[in-house]
Each structure stands twice: as C-alpha cells, then as structure tokens.
Image (cartoon, grey):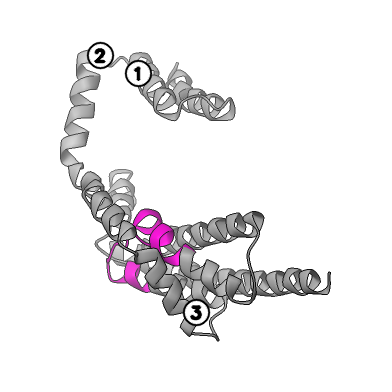
Amino acid sequence: MEYLKLIGIVIIILGFALKFDTIAVVIISAVATALVAGISVPDLLTLLGKSFVENRVVSLFFLTLPMIGVIERHGLKQAAVNAIKKLKNLTPGRILNLYLLIREVACAFGITLSGQVQFVRPLISPMVQAAAGARGKLTPKQIDLIKARSAATDNFGNFYAQNLFVASGGVLLMASTMKSLGHAVEPTSIVLYSIPMAVITFIITAIYNMRFDRQFNVKRNKKQED
C-alpha cells in the first residue's frame, strides 16, 4: 500500500507527457496523493495554506514584472542593443559566457538575479541578437536559436551554482533533510561539493557557447557566398 502514495508522480508524468494543463495536473496529483495517504481534504487545504504563508517570499518577484514592462516600453532593449553595437569585439558566445560568470558569482554571494524575466528577456537576449546581427540581418530561426541559447545559459548557471551560498534555501533544505534521515551533513560540506560542479558547468557551457559562435559564423559565411 505504501507504493500507492507514489501515484502523484505517475499522474504528473502522464499529465506532462499528454500535455495537459500544468496547474490542473499538479493539483490533481496533490489531491490524489493526499487521499491515498489518508489526509482529509480540510487537512490538505490547511497544509497548502500553511506552506504558502511560510514561503510567500518566493512570490515577491511578481512585484518586479510591472517595472520590467515599463522600462522595456521606454527603450531598455534598444539601449542594450546600441551598447553592444559599439563593442565590435563582443560575440554572442562571449556575451553568454560573461553572463554565465556573473550568474554563478552572484549565486555564490546569495544574490538572486531572477534570471529569465528580469535579465534574459529584456537584456541578455537582445544583446546577443545585436552581436550576432552586427554583420547582417538575422533570420527568424536564428533569433529563436539565440533566445533558446540565452535561456539555456541562464538555466545552467542558476541550477549548478545555486548551492554555492551556504545560506541558500536549497543548501539548508538538503542539510535539514539529511539530518532528519540520520545523516549529519553540514551546509558548508554541501557548498564545497557544489564548487566542482559549478566550475565544470562553466567550462562545458563556455565551450558550448564558443562552438555556437563558430556554427553561426559558418552559417553567415555560407549565406554571404550564396
């Protein structure tokens, strides 16, 4: 009967695989898991409400969305594009590698950049597009590729460097969870073991971005020959 408590995972996998509504899948999964585990609906709602109140700080980033919209409307993207056009030696890969470095260093000091919404969409992606399009007009496919690469670089930096700060939520959660299971793990130990992963991620992603530069140059040269 204990395995029935994993039904929520099955529901999420099937729901995502069949491309059902994400929020509906998560809610159904939570309700099903609670009912199988013997948790009543009132207790489930109490648990959800308590969890939301305790972690309400996570939703503070919503307050930044109106500000981002306003500064975008008043020329933030164009200012970023103009700045990149003045720096002729910057390539798309170099910009992405610089942002990756900033992302990982910021995580090490516990500074949250909020990634996709606050940086990638209004700043990083337009800057990379400007660097890539310095010698000619970009195709819609190339623009989509640059957007995807910018988002991927942000994800790499955030995911593999988020545990470099000893007081980050992930580090404290892992330490407390391991302690509750009878394994004494210090937060500093988690940080030390996370450093090699962050370094390896930076090296691999940097090579990945430099290959993107070469790939883009090949496509550009072919286009010029045609």
Horizontal side, residue 46 vs residue 212: left or right? left
- Image coordinates for residue 122, horizontal then vertical, percent: 39, 60
User: What is the spatial separation of the Cα atoms under label 2 and label 3, in whole angstroms?
Assistant: 58 Å
Mark 3 surroundings: few (<14), some (14-19) or many (≥20) residues within 10 A: some
Where are the magenta residues, as a range?
104-125
What amino acid type is highlighted by mark number 3?
A: Lys
Q: Quadrant of residue 47?
A: top left
Q: Is residue 59 visible?
A: yes
Q: Quadrant of residue 191?
A: bottom left
What amino acid type is highlighted by mark number 2?
A: Val
User: What is the spatial separation of the Cα atoms under label 1 and label 2, in whole angstroms?
Assistant: 8 Å
User: What is the spatial separation of the Cα atoms under label 1 and label 3, in whole angstroms?
Assistant: 53 Å
Q: Which mark is residue 41?
A: 2
Observer-nearest of 164 and 52: 52
What amino acid type is highlighted by mark number 1?
A: Val
Q: Is residue 219 above or below residue 31?
A: below
Look at discs 2 and 3 and give the one toward the viewer: 3
Q: Is residue 138 covered in magenta?
A: no
Q: Which mark is residue 31?
A: 1
Q: Which mark is residue 154?
A: none
- CB within 8 Å, label 2 to label 3: no
Q: Is residue 155 above or below residue 60?
A: below
Q: Which residue is mark 3?
A: 85
- Image coordinates for residue 10, horizontal then vertical, percent: 52, 24
Quadrant where the N terminus sits is top left
Dominant secondary structure of the residues highlighted in magenta in the image: helix
Q: Is residue 128 above or below residue 29?
A: below
